[in-house]
Image (cartoon, rainbow, N blue to C red):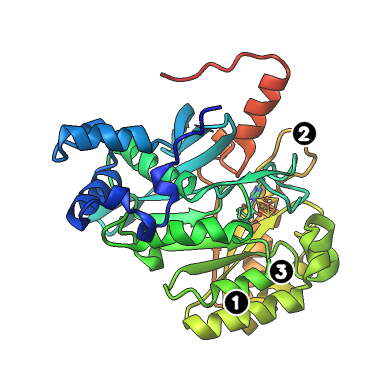
């Protein structure tokens, strides 16, 4: 059987030997891929034709194809990608206009996936419903950013690793991807514009604390005490809130950067004001920002977002208690199932029921 060609962008840059090419040639290839988003050796016009053919014979460049695209009226776009083995993953592109009247700029944030599915089984989450299929490779993480940037036609300002999967469960692929993302010769996105979100893999938080770049950390808390959190997040049985916060303290000490506590509001589960008080107490102790996110409904699950009145009361209580910085994020793209894993869930359900998925050109 023919061995598939390796995906060039799967390799850490230090391993790009490209058959002993001189370093300026390797830099040219890197520039085509990361600065210009060119994923076909034939289009690399400053390389000799024979070299383009040779590289094409040896390496594959495109990690995925666009399987489906959805846009919403508030200009959030969602991409469903088909990987080389047919698995589906998704990325969400969020546009936000910032600045004061005279100078307003639209900033692009891409929400990136790190795994196909997720093994951590949070009860409210579409990504975890079928368990973990596999980790994404370095090139599949990078490919989402390169291709989304081409679709957007402009540079991506911020990355949030809040798509499908648990980023810290796939650090071995993620770290070389981060190296390329951060490098000025790679994607050139600054560490302060990159946020990793974790449901709380304590040993991996400690490992990440040693990574030299100043990337940001967000913790999916979703419950103010162990009893509430473990109802919806099985990982809490492995690492309690106390253990999680001890790891966060280590991370914060090494970084001198605020972390964020994310808190999804789910009706009747974690939205009572006692939880708001616990959340505020934790945020003050960790000097952490708080991000409140009303739950996005998932097909087939019974969880609901609370009423606006309850959401506002919860928000008010956390703020009144003087948690350092509290934001309430009304999800953009609620109308296109922007919460992680939902589009894939729909497509997989449709295909398992024999419904034809119409691919976009
Ligand atoms: N696995 C990581 C990152 C991916 S999930 C983590 O759990 O942090 C990114 C965020 O989306 C998490 O805070 C997660 O709890 C949240 N999320 C998952 N499903 C959601 C839903 N249906 N509505 C709102 N937020 C959701
Ligand atoms: Fe996995 Fe995060 Fe979803 Fe939990 S919320 S199942 S950790 S992707």
Residue topped by disc 1 = 323
Element type at mark 1: loop
Is residue 155 left or right of 255 when viewed as pictured? left
In the image, residue 218 above or below residue 352: below
Q: Residue at x 64, y 84 (%)?
A: 285
Residue topped by disc 2 = 300
Q: Residue at x 63, y 77 (%)?
A: 283
Q: Residue at x 83, y 62 (%)?
A: 230
Q: Residue at x 45, y 48 (%)?
A: 10
Quadrant assignment for the C terminus: top left
Quadrant housing residue 336: top right
**Position in image of residue 47 (x %, y %):** 16, 40
Quadrant housing residue 342: top right
Q: Is residue 351 visible?
A: yes
Q: Upstream in the sequence, badge 3 or badge 1?
A: 3
Residue topped by disc 3 = 276
Q: Nearer the viewer, residue 182 or 1?
A: 1
Q: Upstream in the sequence, badge 2 or badge 3?
A: 3
Q: Is residue 94 visible?
A: no
């Amino acid at each position: 059987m023919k061995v598939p060609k390796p995906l060039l962008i799967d390799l850490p840059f230090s391993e790009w030997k490209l058959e002993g090419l001189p370093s300026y040639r390797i830099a040219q290839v890197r520039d085509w891929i990361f600065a210009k988003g060119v994923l076909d050796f034939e289009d690399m016009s400053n390389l000799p034709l024979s070299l383009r053919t040779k590289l094409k014979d040896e390496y594959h460049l495109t990690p995925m194809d666009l399987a489906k695209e959805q846009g919403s009226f508030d200009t959030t776009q969602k991409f469903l990608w088909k990987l080389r083995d047919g698995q589906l993953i998704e990325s969400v592109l969020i546009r936000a206009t910032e600045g004061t009247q005279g100078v307003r700029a639209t900033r692009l944030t891409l929400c990136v996936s790190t795994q196909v599915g997720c093994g951590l089984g949070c009860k409210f989450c579409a990504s975890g419903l079928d368990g973990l299929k596999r980790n994404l490779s370095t090139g599949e993480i990078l490919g989402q950013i390169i291709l989304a940037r081409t679709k957007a036609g402009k540079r991506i300002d911020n990355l949030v690793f809040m798509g499908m999967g648990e980023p810290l469960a796939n650090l071995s692929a993620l770290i070389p991807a981060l190296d390329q993302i951060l490098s000025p010769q790679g994607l050139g996105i600054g560490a302060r514009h990159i946020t990793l979100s974790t449901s709380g893999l304590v040993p991996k938080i400690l490992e990440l604390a040693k990574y030299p770049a100043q990337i940001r950390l967000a913790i999916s808390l979703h419950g103010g005490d162990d009893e509430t959190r473990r109802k919806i997040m099985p990982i809490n049985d492995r690492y309690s809130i106390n253990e999680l916060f001890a790891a966060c303290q280590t991370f914060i000490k090494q970084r001198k950067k605020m972390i964020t506590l994310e808190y999804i509001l789910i009706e009747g589960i974690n939205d009572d004001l006692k939880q708001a008080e616990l959340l505020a107490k934790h945020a003050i102790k960790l000097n952490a920002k708080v991000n409140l996110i009303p739950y996005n409904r998932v097909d087939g699950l019974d969880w609901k977002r609370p009423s606006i009145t309850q959401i506002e009361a919860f928000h008010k209580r956390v703020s009144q208690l003087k948690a350092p910085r509290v934001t309430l994020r009304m999800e953009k793209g609620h109308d296109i199932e922007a919460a992680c894993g939902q589009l894939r869930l729909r497509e997989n359900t449709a295909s398992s029921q024999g419904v034809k998925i119409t691919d976009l050109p």
